[in-house]
Image: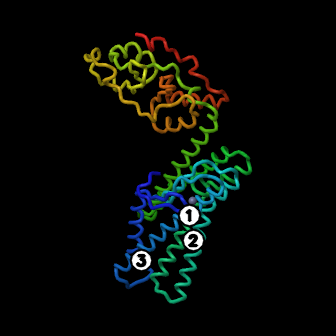
Amino acid sequence: MRQTARLGRIAGIPIGVHWSVFVIMLLLVQGLASVVLPSGARGHATVVYWGVAVVVAALFLAALLAHELAHALVARHYGVRVRAITLWMLGGVSELDGEAPHPRADLLIALAGPVVSLAGAGVFAACAAAASASGAGPLAVTGLAWLAVVNVILGGFNLLPGAPLDGGRVLAAILWWVRRDRASARRTAGRAGMVLGALLIIGGLVEMLLAANLSGLWLTVLGWFVLLAARAETTDVTLRKTLAGVRVGDIMTAPAAYGYTSQSVANFVATVARHHPHRVFPVLDLDGQLVGLVSLTRLAKVPSTDRERTRLGDVTAPVDRTRVLDPAVPLTDAAPAMLAGGHRLAPVVANGRLTGIVTPGDVARATELAELGITPDRGGGDADTSGTTRW
Ligand SMILES: [Zn+2]
């Protein structure tokens, strides 16, 4: 989650907000000032409603932050580093580096947030009762009661048992403790999250149809985010488990088919591109350094009459350094970006030399072999390189 604005540090943890928070705050202040507060306390000037609405919305944001801080501080207590806390449209995100050392730590980190939200709800409810008893105006009582209700919803909703919600993490921690297998516990919690996301989407759609208003839209959007995050989580866990110990060098296609910048497009197509099953090829300069990548679609844009005199270097796209892989890197670090980013090819470079390429097909093959219980080895029989470098 990219932080749009930094709010500062609390206990050494950088706190920031995503731009979507400003949108939500505007909607919240508007709803409080024009609906919630006037219906609870009649007869105040408009400016008073807006002033109180801003204070109540700010307290809501503080309660959200307290929820995330609780996760972060318990995580840190168990030796898990906290990179940052970011507040966004659907709540907060604590970015943790590393994993909880044991199921009990995992459980307490997950529970800390909802516990703080529910305790906060109790505090706001007590304040509302005290304000009412001491004869404070209905405006203050309405604002405090609203904060109590919202914190109950925040704590309660987050306890629904599906990852990535806190309840899903609680479920995963308990299953980890029972099964003594963290990966399988995470997968189950992820699947529960997908079911939960689907139910939220259906609930939101039904609400939109029956109530004929847009309040169900919120639930639908929320369900969609839960579904996507849960799916990403199960994929990641499966990939990490099946591919543990496999390195990029184990699954890459090597040696790679490539071209030279000084080569003509016509020659490259005739001697390399047509003989290999790839859609993207690395391009080297005469010193053997990787310059960039060229795709078949890019080559097709060169008119056939110009292919003799167009150099490959003229149509090569510079290589994005983040896409270049080291053969010693664990595949689990490289594969998610490879699969999710839609990258069609990643060059593998060791000691400044192109040693191979990894395609989504290589990753898929390695995953399927790993599921069969076979450790992937290099390229198999299809790494025929005759004609790749000579012309
Ligand atoms: Zn939480």
Q: Find residue 34 and report its image quarter.
A: bottom left
Mark 1, residue position: 67
Nearest the eye: 114 or 371: 114
Q: Earlier in the sequence, mark 1 or mark 2?
A: 1
Q: Are marks 3 and 2 in contact (CB under 8 Å)?
A: no
Q: Is residue 52 above or below residue 302?
A: below
Q: Tell me whether the residue at label 3 lies in contact with that at label 1, contact meaning CB atoms closer than 8 angstroms.
A: no
> Is disc 1's CB within 8 Å of ligand 1?
yes
Secondary structure category for the residue under label 3: helix
Question: Separation of disc 3 and disc 2 at Cα?
Answer: 19 Å
Quadrant (top left, top right, bottom left, bottom right) of the C terminus: top left
Residue bearing mark 2: 120
Q: Does 328 sit left or right of 143 as displayed?
A: right
In the orientation shown, which residue stands out farthest toward the top?
A: 391
Quadrant of picture, ligand 1: bottom right
CA gap, disc 3 and disc 1: 23 Å
* Residue 354 percent coordinates (x, y): 48, 23
Report the residue at 54% width, 73% height from top. 148
Residue beneath label 3, please?
52
User: Which residue type carries mark 1?
Assistant: His
In the picture, measured across the screen, residue 260 lies left or right of residue 84, that is left
Q: 342 and 320: which one is in front?
A: 320
- Locate residue 262, reporting x and y percent: 34, 17
